[in-house]
Image: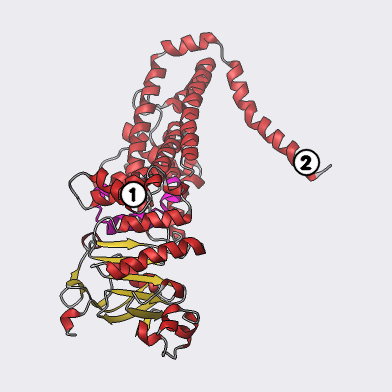
Amino acid sequence: MNKSDLIWDIDIRGQIGAFEYDYQIKSYHSAIAVIGNNGSGKTTLLRILAGLQRPSVGHIRIGNTLLYSEADNHFEACEDRLASYVPSNNSLFPHLTVFENLMFALQCRNVGGDLKTRVNAHLNQYKLGKLSDRFPPSLSTGEYQRVALIRSTLLTPAFYIFDEPMAALDVEHRATLRDLLSNLAATSTAPVVLSTHDDRDINENYGTIVVIGSGRVRLQLTSQEIATCNDLFVNEFFQHHAVRDRT
Amino acid sequence: MKPRRITSILALLMLCYLALPLTGLILQITPSDLANVTNNSQIWEAFKLSILTTAVSTLIIVLFGSALAWRIAEQHKRPSILTQALIQWPIIVPPSVLGIALLDSFGRQGILGNLTGQSIAFTTAAVVVVQVLVAAPLYVQTVLASFQGASHQLIEVGRTMGASPFLLLRHVILPLHKHAILGGAALASARALGEFGATLIFAGNLSGTTQTVPLAIYEMLETDLNTARMLALLLLVTGSALVAVTFYAGNRGKP
């Protein structure tokens, strides 16, 4: 593989308050997973990728798009990155119905055509048509996150950012959403980054696994390398894991 | 006696105490007082001035106060002691202190007066200046509590979706905070409408120029007690209506 096939090319440093970070990720895989303990800096990395934080030094290139380069004084604003960003909770507008939440996503991008039909078709495709008129606070956590996820797939983004989207879910809903995400990771033409602290959320569809600790990338592994990795955190994380068992 | 019974008695006494002045005021008013009020041009001047100045000061408070509260909320942490003190001191200090402070800043010998050679003391503008000072803290505190809620993450999600600032303001920020903005504005205008002490010192008591309803009541206490009572009732009803708006907005704002 040559350098132009590189999909994730991240080399950044910076500081938010007292928290210092230093992330270096290079991956040829379209879908990558970020793991690490709470407070390790997963969310910070993903917020930087979304354009919500600006690093002090380095560069970020995803696919063919240069999103940030300190050397060129280039910083693509989050409004222009065309990313789909789903945080772990609180991402649906509570005063808009499910239908209106999806409509708003299209209005933000100035999409033309018959928006209502498009939104309805999308909701029905994921069997969420019955939630159309409901307000987010009345949804169960499982329904809420499913709506948040499918809203993010309404338009094909430049890339997907999922920040622990299943953190608040019970086992059953977690499995449903995990399949939805895994399917997206396997089939999407747009790169996908998923952060999680549950090993079962990750399978071989995520080609690269990035281990974050104390604001740094401690390890970067392919899914094949997990079985032979001697890192204590990785071993504990994947102790009953499918990827490890299969490889 | 059981503690629960003791608190019940204390609570009842407190309620009675709160209701007594209201009852006293209402019982003293006769229908003929109403006729006196409608025929008195000074009263209508005062009422018009009160409504006008309160409307202007509320607009100023909503515009500038919202911006201040927004900036504080964006820090995602408890405001510094200095910031807290700045947005609360007009509530804490006595009105007479506020009046003197305003003379020393906006008056002829004040900081701005010395700089510009102009004084706004004893003008209608002075009435607005006082009202903004005493009422803005109530507005800022009300909307700050709302702005500090979860809306920042929603705004970030909206931004990543590509929403323009105008789209976010219209479809996210205003709908999410409209109850706090409405409630805060009602609370602030009730306070502005009732402002008396600092207005008397800084703006004076000039009929048609700076005499608002509370000042007219003060003047009439010496000459026409019944009309003063009627005016007090008028102010009470207007203030209650504004507090009712606050209450309504507060309840509607709950999820």
The question of residue B153 being in magenta is answered with yes
Give the residue type that dot 2 points to. Ile
Quadrant in which residue B13 is drawn = top right
Q: Is residue A35 left or right of residue B93?
A: left
Q: What stretch is highlighted in magenta?
A: B142-167
- Badge 1 element: helix
Return the residue nearer the eye: A146 or B101: A146
Quadrant in which residue B177 is drawn = top left
Q: On what subunit does the disc labeled 1 rest?
A: A
Q: Mark 1 points at which residue?
A: A124
Q: On what subunit does the disc labeled 2 rest?
A: B
* Residue at the extreme front of the image, as rendered: A246
Q: Can you give x and y, in whole percent of width and height, for residue B6 in the image?
A: 77, 41
Chief secondary structure of the magenta span? helix
* Labels 2, 1: one chain: no
Q: Is residue B60 left or right of residue A135?
A: left
Q: Can you give x and y, in whole percent of width and height, for residue B58 in the image?
A: 37, 37
Residue beneath the point at 38% across and 71% down: A195
